[in-house]
Image (cartoon, rainbow, N blue to C red):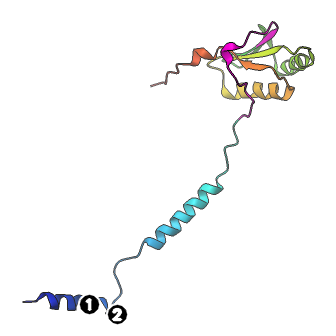
């Protein structure tokens, strides 16, 4: 029969022997993997597909409608309408240049169709931004307040 003292002695003798350990120390491996993960996260480029546009701030409910405004619409198939008349992108740039020179500058209201493509809307917004128009707004956005997901 082995007593408690002999059991402790045999454990101490086994741990001091020159036999290789069968367990792998994973702490250094985890440390290296965490450093690599941090380096990868820091080197991922920021998303560059965003469209920077300065939107109006303040309380929109108290704004009075402007006496002169122009409605810019885009349909689901990408057709542009300026005050109800079909136009192309070159004509839009020309019209926006005319709006920019008017005193006082009239407001340009943008109303995209719900099915209009993002890329077509982004192109129109880039044309508007390049024109330098300062009075620009989105209209009829309240109809998109409740967004239903496709199942």
Q: Is residue 118 above or below residue 142?
A: below
| Numbered disc total | 2
Q: What is the quadrant of residue 9 in the picture?
A: bottom left
- Where is the C terminus found, in terms of image quarters? top left
C-alpha separation, residue under disc 1 versus residue under disc 2: 12 Å
Query: Could you tell me residue 58's position as x and y percent?
Result: 70, 23
Q: In which quarter of the image is residue 95?
A: top right
Q: Which of marks 1 and 2 is nearer the N terminus?
A: 1
Residue drawn at point x = 30 percent, y = 88 percent: 15
Q: Is mark 1 on a helix, strand or loop?
A: helix
Circles 1, 2 touching at the beta carbon (< 8 Å): no
Depicted 40 relative to depicted 98: above or below: below
Q: What element carries label 2?
A: loop
Q: In this view, does 11 lie to the left or right of 23?
A: left
Q: Which residue is drawn at 10% across and 89% down?
A: 2
- Residue 37 at x, y = what percent? 55, 60
Instruction: Please state which of residues 67 and 133 is positioned toward the viewer in this rendering.
Output: 67
Mark 2 crowdedness (10 Å alpha carbons): few <14, some 14-19, many ≥20: few
Up-down: is 48 above or below 148? below
The residue that disc 2 covers is 18
Is residue 55 located in the magenta-colored stretch of the structure? yes
Please indicate whether residue 84 sits to the left or right of residue 33 in the image: right
Q: What percent of the width, then of the height, locates residue 136?
A: 77, 20
Q: In this view, does 48 lie above or below 113?
A: below
| Overall secondary structure of the magenta section | loop
Label at residue 62:
none
Q: In which quarter of the image is residue 48?
A: top right
Residue at x 69%, y 13% (from the top left corner): 62
Residue under label 1, please give it. 12
Start and end of the magenta stretch? Answer: 51-71
């Amino acid at each position: 029969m082995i007593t408690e003292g002999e059991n402790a002695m045999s454990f101490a003798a086994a741990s001091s022997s020159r036999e290789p350990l069968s367990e792998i120390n994973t702490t250094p491996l985890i440390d290296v993997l965490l450093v690599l993960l941090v380096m990868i996260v820091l080197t991922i480029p920021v998303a560059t597909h965003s469209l920077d546009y300065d939107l109006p701030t303040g309380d929109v409910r108290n704004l009075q409608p402007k006496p002169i405004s122009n409605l810019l619409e885009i349909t689901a198939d990408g057709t542009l309408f300026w005050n109800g008349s079909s136009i192309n992108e070159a004509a839009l740039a020309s019209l926006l240049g005319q709006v920019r020179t008017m005193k006082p500058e009239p407001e340009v209201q943008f109303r995209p169709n719900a099915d209009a493509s993002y890329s077509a809307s982004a192109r129109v917004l880039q044309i508007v931004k390049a024109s330098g128009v300062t009075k620009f707004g989105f209209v009829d956005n309240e109809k998109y307040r409740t967004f239903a997901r496709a199942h």
